Image (cartoon, rainbow, N blue to C red):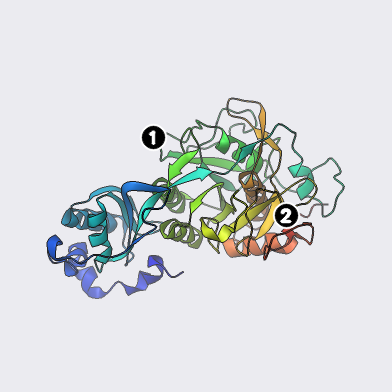
Amino acid sequence: MGNSRKLRRSLNAGVVAAGVTGLVAAGLGTAAAAPEGQILSANTPNAVDGSYIVVLNDSLNAKSVTTAATQLADRYGADVAKTYSSALDGFSVKASEAEAKRLAANPSVDYVVQNQRVHATETQSPTPSWGLDRIDQAELPLDDSYTYSTTADNVTAYIIDTGVDASHEDFGDRVQPGQDFVDGGGDGDDQQGHGTHVAGTVAGSEYGVAKGASIVPVRVLDANGSGTTEGVISGVDWVAQNAEGPAVANMSLGGTADQALDTAVEGAIEAGVTFVAAAGNESADAGNGSPSRVESAITVAASDENDAQAEFSNYGSVVDLYAPGVDITSAAMGGGETTMSGTSMAAPHVAGAAALYLADNPQATPAEVSEALTSSATEGAISNPTGETPNLLLNTGQE
């Protein structure tokens, strides 16, 4: 993977014997004498001032990561905000730019990246949905039906988003307690609506692809549909640590390219969770954003009812396939339904399809799920794919 998790076996016996104190102290003199390193994604338009994510070189257990984080932060005058030990080994800090640069130069640190703002990817539209009708057939015209062989009631779908309205009638009692990384202490209740719509497409009894899957909200975006990579990484790390059985995670969000977020998603996939990511809505190369550029994730571009690439959809070689993303009707926060457009709406069609596959193949790896979905997709269906975007349209293969 080219990141700190690949170095799991590089932790030497001397460090283990000495404990994490030796790990931190070995590379340190005094803070004043420390050289300065590079901060990745520094001072971008979406950068969060005074907030950085530190990824460690070696794989440690959760207790050791916490100890290393505290000692490194104290050494350089920074304050630990969050620690990560499942999807990646690292922590976030509140620090000045100079303190962050000194942290980046420490031999125990793989890299430091400035915290970034991320956002949900959707636009509103008033017209009715057609997505379920499209994904179970290879060709147009639509036949006004959706056929499925399983409800995927043995699969769990993690919705990494604005939360989920657990009281919505489309979910029954299938929303499990989640986690809130925006306000803390909550179980992932939606304050914006985007996550509820996404969850409805993944697993709603009326609007969903996998109509019986369990739903776990992981709230990383606020009531404005915005968040930070610090919070998103916390959510991904929590999923990697807590996911059990066949599981899929949907990320209908994105921001600028971010190595730490990519590392976290890669680590969670390595832990066995299939991740689906929206390509983004900037009519640009999805390879320039995160998590859309993560190769081991399933990245989804949006198509419209005429099998054309949606005018807003990102594209490029990192995209795995297209799915319906224009005028998609699904569950609304507070009850009823609402219609939205975006690659945020395309991705959950694929997450639901992944759940269907996992229902029948519960031991499948994320790579096997990805291969199954791209192999069964309809080739050549999109009339205007941009550049090197694979011309593959999601097909659940039931008609």
Instruction: Decide which of 229, 36 is in the foreground and name it.
Output: 36
Residue at x 78% of width, y 47% of height: 134
Instruction: Decide which of 18, 129 is in the foreground and name it.
Output: 129
Above or below, 172 against 80 in this view is above
Count the labels in the image: 2
Above or below, 382 against 10 in this view is above
Provide the residue designation for mark 1: 183
Residue 41 percent coordinates (x, y): 39, 57
Q: Identify which amino acid the numbered label 1 is placed on.
A: Asp
Provide the residue designation for mark 2: 394
The part of the image, by quadrant, that contains residue 240 is: bottom left
Residue at x 37% of width, y 36% of height: 184
- Dot 1 alpha-carbon crowd within 10 angstroms: few under 14, some 14 to 19, many 20 or more: few
Q: Is residue 80 left or right of residue 220?
A: left
Residue 303 percent coordinates (x, y): 72, 50
Among numbered discs 2 and 1, the one appearing first in the sequence: 1
- Dot 2 alpha-carbon crowd within 10 angstroms: few under 14, some 14 to 19, many 20 or more: many
Residue 96 visible in the shown view: yes
